[in-house]
Amino acid sequence: MRKYRLLSLLILALFAYSCNSWLDVKPEDELDESDMFATGDGYRHALNGIYYGMGGQTLYGEDLTWGLVDVFGRTYTLYSVYGGGNRALTMFYYGVYQNNWDNILLEPEIESIWENAYKMVANCNNLIQNISKEDPDKFAYKVREQKMIWGEALALRAFIQFDMLRLFAASPAMNPGTTRYIPYISEYPSYVSIPLTVDSCLNSAIRDLKEARELLWKADSATTFTAQRRFETTSSSDDFFLEHKRGYRL
């Protein structure tokens, strides 16, 4: 009996170890934070990843540029759901255009906008917190490149959350007063997000933009970075990120 009990305990211990080992496995397409920020190139990838994420369908690849917000704003005149193309998308837009707020596709779409926008904000905050204490020598162009990446991340944090304020809060012209609408998140990780007033959010965005301007003024005012050079596709990898690719990025 004692032998069976010991055997059961051994099997249980091996099972627990195997589970822990399995849980510790890192997906091949996922980088650990320490790996991501181990090199200057890692910071470049992190910044490019934010821009890439912002180009998604529920953000600036559609909904926040020519898609849902333009339907809300009556930029288009939609007469019918039968217009060819993507019929499901047309039905969704037509429902919004007709002020059909019970449209079953609308709520999950808005939730996706909110979730993905603040996911990009979290990525900005993670980058900012790491690069603010980084050694400039880690970057190919030293402090100049460090400030450029840092400043762009700050500006993106302000840009995204200002857009969330426009979408989910009352206009300052409506005198929203002390009503709280959305959080303005500037820390990573952020487990508790407290909604703020419109004025508080605007002041936070202005603060971030002013700090970004101080970090970016050398990169943005360089006379050697002509408009043509910002969009060239043949160059070294360092020049490509700092000068040429920046035109596409921004």
Image: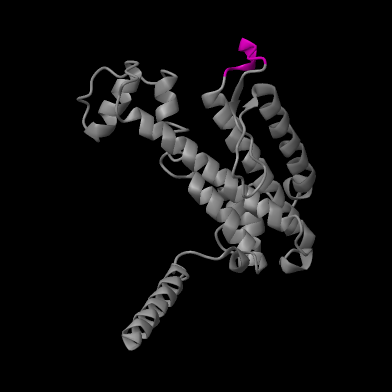
**Residue 128 seen anywhere in this rendered image of the structure:** yes
Q: Position of residue 239 (x, y in %)?
A: 65, 62
Report the side of 110 relative to 145 (left or right): left
Report the side of 25 relative to 244 (left or right): left
Looking at the image, which residue is at 68% across and 49% down?
A: 226
Q: Is residue 140 magenta?
A: no
Q: Position of residue 106 (x, y in %)?
A: 35, 28
Task: State the extent of the magenta-drawn residues as a range.
Answer: 170-177
As displayed, is residue 103 above or below residue 44? Answer: above
In which quarter of the view is residue 23 placed?
Answer: bottom left
Looking at the image, which residue is at 45% across and 36% down?
A: 113
Q: Position of residue 120 (x, y in %)?
A: 55, 45
Q: Nearer the viewer, residue 35 or 40?
A: 35
As displayed, is residue 53 above or below residue 166? Answer: below
As displayed, is residue 174 above or below residue 60? Answer: above
As displayed, is residue 94 above or below residue 84? Answer: above
**Residue 247 seen anywhere in this rendered image of the structure:** no
Identity of the residue furthest to the front in this view: 1
Q: Nearer the viewer, residue 83 or 132?
A: 132
Looking at the image, which residue is at 56% across and 25% down?
A: 166
Q: Is residue 174 magenta?
A: yes
Q: Position of residue 11 (x, y in %)?
A: 36, 80
Identity of the residue furthest to the bottom in this view: 3
Q: Nearer the viewer, residue 242 or 55?
A: 55
Task: Assign the magenta stretch its main secondary structure.
Answer: loop
How many numbered marks, from 0 up? 0
Q: Quadrant of the C terminus?
A: top right
In which quarter of the view is residue 237 placed?
Answer: bottom right
Q: Quadrant of the N terminus?
A: bottom left
